[in-house]
Image: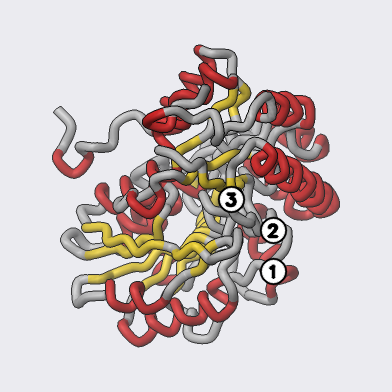
Amino acid sequence: MTTQRLRGFGATIFAEMTQLAARHEAVNLGQGFPDWDGPPGMLQAACDAIRAGINQYPPGRGFSGLREAICEDRRRRYGIVHDPETEAVVTTGATEAISAAMLGLVEPGSEVILVEPYYDAYAAAVALAGARRVSVSLVPEGNGKGFRLDLDPLRAAVTTRTAMIVINSPHNPTGTVFTADELLGVVTLAAERDLLVLADEVYERLVFDAAHVPLASLPGAQGRVVTVSSAAKTFNVTGWKVGWALAAPPLADAVLAAKQFLTFASGAPFQVAVEHALRHEQAWVEALREALRGKRDRIATALVEAGLDPFECEGTYFVCARAGASAEEFCRDLPARRGVAAIPVTAFTDRPGPWHDVVRFAFCKTDPVLDEGISRLASAPLVESLGPGGRVS
């Protein structure tokens, strides 16, 4: 029998929509994984490491070479200095880093504030820590714009039991990149109320129209921010599960204290390959970002032509759009009716009302796959052909 704190966390919406996509041979624009490989030099580095016998446990904090490369990359791009010996922990993907941070830093009975819509693993991590989640919603801007973070509701959500605020920028699922002013407001609030902030920045390199501002770079962040990122989205290796957490020593030690009893260590040859990529594959990442920018523009245009109302996407893999009907009904019908899979944004919320008709499409696909998805979406206007309950004709 599942424990009470994990009841309600059944199969994810990604599993459900992927199954529907497979059943109907649909183009899967739901789950956010790329369908082409990362840089060849990085892949070769992994093969070389395997053949060289680097197949046993790495150190609990991760190989020193990778930790050094992570910290060097952070310093080079943002001017943020971390000690790789005491302030970096390599994890089994960013998701483990998030869970380990909560398990190591949040006491049972505390509250954790999430900004909704939120990555679904956050809610499960809060539950595993025995804490209570409190959600604050992003606010859609008018005239087809994106979303903004309203600091007044965030401030009002803080209580004497609040331990941590989770901030995800670039933001999944909306594609929003928070401004320096928004992020500074979060850090200022955290400093005023002595709170920790978990900054999920896994899409930090995939920004198109706005600069990514690392939350840890802002005044007041020192000693209270845990930054999480990974190789998955940067280098197209979501299956390698190589992530990391960066924080001041006491916070990093707490992450490690939990992480060592989750997986202890993982991905030895992949850690070596990611070190190579951080040091030598920057041009590949730049080309990836430009390719994704073009894919974003194409899917956004296609959604307009299909009768949907897309929001602006400043980063990530995702464009969200209003479907003009129930997002859940829309997404459950779309694979059978049009041969395309998408994700209802209501799956990432505690209060689905404001998001009841918002659908997320992933554009991180090869051009032939994206072309086929766009062709199927364009076969007739989607919104005009919606029947009662949001069914697609």
Residue type marked 1: Ala
Answer with left or right where residue 6 lies relative to residue 357.
left
Q: Quadrant of residue 9?
A: top left
**Where is residue 368 shown, x and y percent of the image?**
78, 25
Mark 3, mark 1: which one is toward the viewer?
A: 1
Residue type marked 3: Ser
Quadrant including the N terminus: top left
> In the rendered structure, which disc, 3 or 1, sits on the residue that comes first in sequence?
1
Residue 207 is marked as 2
Q: Which residue is mark 3?
A: 230
Answer with left or right where residue 343 lies relative to residue 311.
left
Q: Are marks 2 and 3 in contact (CB under 8 Å)?
A: no
Residue depicted at 55% across the width and 39% down the height: 241
Residue depicted at 58% across the width and 32% down the height: 382
Above or below, 250 against 26 in this view is: below
Which of 67 and 202 lies nearest the eye of the viewer? 202
Mark 2–mark 3 Cα distance, whole angstroms, equals: 15 Å
Above or below, 275 against 9 in this view is: below
Mark 1: secondary structure: loop
> In the rendered structure, which disc, 2 or 3, sits on the residue that comes first in sequence?
2
Q: Which residue is mark 1?
A: 211
**Where is residue 252 shown, x and y percent of the image?**
44, 64
Mark 3–mark 1 Cα distance, whole angstroms, equals: 19 Å
Q: Are marks 1 and 2 in contact (CB under 8 Å)?
A: yes
Which of 260 and 146 lies nearest the eye of the viewer? 146
Q: Is residue 72 visible?
A: no
Residue depicted at 58% across the width and 38% down the height: 32
Answer with left or right where residue 325 lies relative to residue 54.
left
